[in-house]
Amino acid sequence: AQSVTQLGSHVSVSEGALVLLRCNYSSSVPPYLFWYVQYPNQGLQLLLKYTTGATLVKGINGFEAEFKKSETSFHLTKPSAHMSDAAEYFCAVIGNYGQNFVFGPGTRLSVLP
Amino acid sequence: NAGVTQTPKFQVLKTGQSMTLQCAQDMNHEYMSWYRQDPGMGLRLIHYSVGAGITDQGEVPNGYNVSRSTTEDFPLRLLSAAPSQTSVYFCASSYSIGLAGGAYFGPGTRLTVL
């Protein structure tokens, strides 16, 4: 069965610093991978996704992620953190039968002034 | 487009009470689903539907019922609420049954069961 792990339930960075949020997955089939962001008291919003093709994918708000099959990873990065990036971030993979997302436990990002 | 809407935003129930969480989308999406979000556990699938008249169970279906009589609406029913159902509930829809395009999530319903 598919599963997703996210290293670090809480990550703090200074404004302007590099953001790196880690995601590893297990999948018995070629994975479709997603990053969602959840701002306080809101629903989830799609940041970016990998389905096929280029392994470096760019999303909204300056975020990008790289699919590394050999490492079963899909880490999320942003070169320079902004205060507005403070949120919870979820990595997800599509489940075995393509009918649901399997989410990681989430990483809360704090951005310090 | 309003996207995915959910009502109510907040609800407090007593153990044993019943209620229905409403979800509607105006994007003509065939796929709709319900997730619950609990701290440190991410989101877990309760039920989903791939079209009107078709529903199926997800990872945590016990204690919940769904129906899909129209493309737009996908209500979630709690027949006899229990404290273990205290959670934040999200409805999601997708134009792609295979979910490759991602999904649109509603703003959530925060439910407390006393």
Image (cartoon, rainbow, N blue to C red):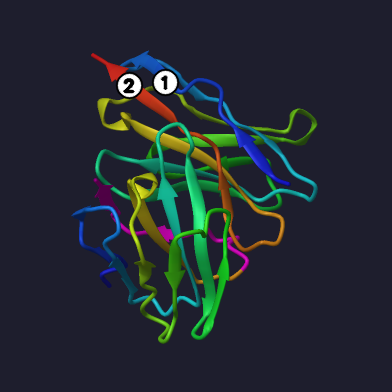
Q: Which amino acid does label 1 sit on?
A: His
Q: Which of B25 and B16 is in front in this view?
A: B16
Residue at (71%, 55%) from the top-left corner? Answer: A96
Q: Given this view, does label 1 or label 2 mark the residue nearer the observer?
A: 1
Q: What stretch is highlighted in magenta?
A: B98-114
Image quadrant in which you'd find residue B106: bottom left
Give the percent coordinates (x, y) of residue A36.
Answer: 45, 44
The numbered disc on residue A10 is 1
Per the image, is A19 magenta?
Answer: no
Work out whether mark 1 precedes mark 2 in sequence or the reverse, and give the earlier one. 1
A104 left or right, relative to A25? left
Of B17 and B97, the residue lying toward us: B17
Q: Quadrant of the N terminus of chain B?
A: bottom left
For disc 2, the marked residue is: A110
Location of residue A113 (image quadrant): top left
Does B33 sit above or below residue A30?
below
- Work out whether residue B87 or residue A13 is closer to the camera in this orientation and state it: B87
Residue B107 drawn in magenta: yes
Q: Which of B56 and A51 is in front in this view?
A: B56
